[in-house]
Amino acid sequence: MRIAFLEPYDGGSHRAFREGLTAHSRHEIRSWTLPPRFWKWRMRGAAPWFADRLREDAPQCDLLLATDFLNAADLRGLLPRPLDRAPLLLYMHENQLTYPLSPDEAFDFHFGFTNIVSCLAADRVVFNSEYHRTLFLDALPDYLARMPEAVPKGIRERLAARSCVLPVGIARAPHPPDAFAPYLGGSCDAGLGPGWPRDPGGHVILWNHRWEFDKRPQMFVGALLRLAGRGRAFRLLLLGEPRQQEGVFAPLRDRLGDRILAWGEQDRARYRELLAQADIVVSCAAQEYFGISVAEAVHAGCYPVLPRDQAYPSLYGAHCRGRHLYDGEEGLVALLDALLTGDACGHVCSLPMDADACCWERLAPRFDQLFEEILGS
């Protein structure tokens, strides 16, 4: 099968998804991409740009695969024949109905509606988690109720019927653990359990997310400064692309600089090396529909400390009854404090998860099967 992959925002998890699927699918995938910037203009203008590229390149294509920053309805209307007749799969990394606004941003109804129309134009819609799918579908009635008249009927039911869930795959760790985060195999003095000897410098806490407002880096910084004020020993890996939020981390560099083992964006090989050195991965996200950075860290052996109000409970919560989840900054400080001092003994459990379940070697065949089902329908 020949698949045309159209990615208007080729960075972060979007790029990781495209590259991983292309490398592991048994089908021939050819990509057309745009750089990861100007996301609003991508939603407005990427469709005619891609239509022009496909008209020029005239690829032999059995299936179109696009992601949520592309207006799929515009694309289908602009494609030349016979490409306009090819089935289209839309992959939803995020959506603009429920995505949190930055402090200086006003709500724009049109971007969410672009997502809705794109889903209606697609033959199949795939979400990266059941949490994301449910959140999107449940937001539709109130969102559409903003329309003054001529409100289309049955959209939630139609999109529920044509949608499914397949997560973003990750690369297999060079030496994945037999079980993630092996807590409580020994005494409280063992700290994070067997294989996690207490280092004089303390356990290594990892931040490996985008340095942007929706990841709430200020909560992470505040919690660590409070723990340092209590005399807790820990070291830090502060990874990711700084972008506009580098100043938020300045207090850590100024006051805890001697504890920071790595700072900022790393090449892929070095990033994976650093993941293997971390003990605890922390997320403070205000929105997380899947969380590829947490998945990569957990697969590398990190114990996750995660907010309860995002996708994480559905992805990780069943394995230890939510004991690695927290509510708000006070909950984050309390959980990290217990982990760093060993007081979590008896309250935190292991994550007996299949270390390969989230890897592309397992997920790519499921995507391939879906592609074949779409083409055969």
Image (cartoon, helix red, strand yellow):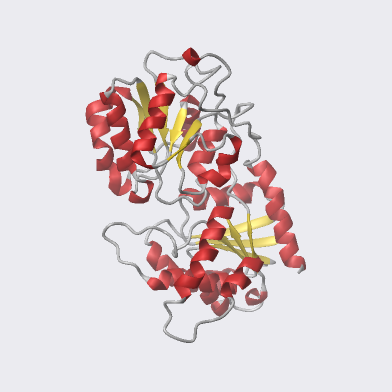
**Is 331 drawn above or below residue 132 in the view shown?**
above
Residue 160, given in percent of the width and then of the height, sits at 62, 66
Residue sitting at the far right: 376
Judging depth in this view, the residue of 86 and 113 nearest the camera is: 113
Q: Is residue 215 left or right of residue 268?
A: left
- The quadrant of the rendering that contains the C terminus is bottom right
Residue 226, given in percent of the width and then of the height, sits at 28, 30
**Is 307 drawn above or below residue 263 in the view shown?**
below
Residue 221, given in percent of the width and then of the height, sits at 30, 36
Residue at x 51%, y 59% (from the top left corner): 135
**Is 178 drawn above or below residue 198 in the view shown?**
below
- The quadrant of the rendering that contains the N terminus is bottom right
Q: Quadrant of residue 281?
A: top left
Q: Quadrant of residue 32?
A: bottom right
Q: Is residue 105 left or right of residue 196?
A: left
Residue 17, given in percent of the width and then of the height, sits at 56, 50
